[in-house]
Image (cartoon, helix red, strand yellow):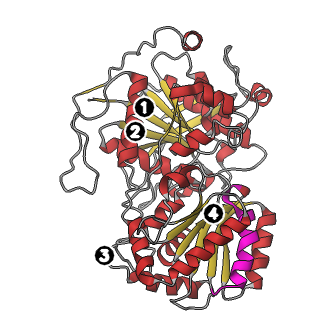
Amino acid sequence: MVQARILFAAAEAAPLAKVGGMADVVGSLPVVLRKLGQDVRIIMPLYGFLWDKFGQEPGQYPRSKDPIWSKQVMGQVADIYESVLPGTDVPLYLVSHYCFAPHRIYYGEDEFWRFTFFANAVAEFAWTYYPWKPNIIHCHDWHTGMIPAWMHQAPDIGTVFTIHNLAYQGPWRWQLERMTWLPWYFSAHNTMAAGILYADQVNTVSPTYAMEIRTPLHGEGLQDLLAWKGERLRGILNGIDTDRFDPRTDPDLEANFSIDDLSGRAANKATLQAKLGLIVNPDTFLMGMVARLVEQKGIDLLIQALDRFLAYSDAQFVLLGGSGETHYEGRIREMAERHPGKMAYQKGYQPKLAQLIYGGADAFLMPSRFEPCGISQMIAMRYGCVPIVRRTGGLVDTVSHHIPSKGIGTGYCFDRYEALDFYTCLARAWEAFQHKETWQALQKRGMASDFSWHRSALEYLRMYELILNLPLLPEKPPEPPNSPSSSPPKLKKPISSQPRSKGIPKLQQRHEE
């Protein structure tokens, strides 16, 4: 077993900057990979809201006083500071420029320019920062899609490109030509396509999504390119940080609980109901949802089915809605006004309230139109909150349909993206909730599911091995982190700093495959 130097490049990393599931992946996977003996580091933009967190006062997150690297990028000066991901030993590089000064991650007229600038800075940093040079740059979504294109002919740096959401594809070629330089062999029409075309290995965040995006229905116009990628495209299921998301120790819950003693959930439910102005009743079927208000998350289905379901049942519903489309927010607010005491809506992502929803709601709704993986359903199951999901993407890989007669399944699933199917699924779950013993057994099956990063991290190591052609996996695979007999793997030797040979140039190699 040898040690690789892996640089994660992404627009988000939990707990510092989070909008979607990408942040959870980038904030959790490097921690596990380091425990498996790899030298993994993260690079991300230094957003305006991070300047206060990374101050020099006692108790603040540490940050190097002066930049460790500074260089002209796209006609501008980019500075990089060094820090550490909070609560871990993962080194963190922060790209500083005035375009990241606003207190936001996405949106704005300069979104394409600022992330193209970020990707260019990462490439220049990897080429010229000699104290530490990566063997692999692990790129995430369109924001970093140009990195594999620029690294395509580099003999000593391989690339992995992870697709978190194919629907967002970044700037088109004509826009890139006005912002930055393109290599002579560049033939992609946008940055998402560039990442897929030029990366050594490509993966999505669930096996089912990896198959879906090869079809016209989910391929977003890139299905032919993805099909051409062949065996170099795979699906690796996301995991969750089981230490952070643990109902036994979660400080954001009113009462902690475990799979052996679920009594604490009643206190969480009562607190959630009282906090949001719902009628406090332990026997009421309480549904929760934490999602952005966008079409992908099935908000159309929610609006069509939920209004009638709340009118004809005693169920309650709480929605914590992040950023999204304003017309959805208006419809949601109108619905909440029609059902006082039965429905509550909270705008903006509130981490503490999200945890209380996971730990207090009886069911968790994810009627997604498409879902590359989904993190929320895994967290919900770990907290005994039964998921109600549509069979798509990672929801297929993580939630199995409850069959009471056989005592199997971890949630409720429906197939078609139709309001009637969703309504029927809600009604079945509501009826099942009346039978407390079988419902509790359903909760415990979900809580017993293993969604830790351990298994997925080994799959990522296998993918890195294909690029480096070197053994990265330990001779004896370590046991999951919760096992008392597990211990960190021993390293035999680091990877040589000498450039690796990729044989014939990649462009020529593709024509000969």
* Mark 1 residue type: Met
Percent coordinates x, y for residue 333 in the rendering: 76, 76
| Contact? badges 2 and 1 (CB < 8 Å) | yes
User: What is the number of the mark on residue 291?
Assistant: 4
Percent coordinates x, y for residue 383 in the rendering: 43, 70
* Mark 3 residue type: Asp
Residue bearing the label numbered 1: 463
Extreme residue toward the front, this view: 405
* Mark 2 residue type: Glu
Q: Residue at x 43, y 71 (%)?
A: 442
Q: Residue at x 76, y 27 (%)?
A: 173
Q: Is residue 72 above or below residue 249?
A: above
Residue 505 sits inside the magenta stretch: no
Q: CA distance from mark 3 to mark 4?
A: 29 Å
Residue 301 sits inside the magenta stretch: yes
What is the secondary structure assignment of the residue under circle 1? helix
Image quadrant containing the N terminus? top left
Left-right relation of 293 to 149: right
Q: Is residue 256 visible?
A: yes
Residue stretch in magenta: 296-314
Of the residues tagged 2 and 4, which is closer to the observer?
Answer: 2
Dot 3, crowdedness within 10 Å: few (<14), some or many (≥20)?
few
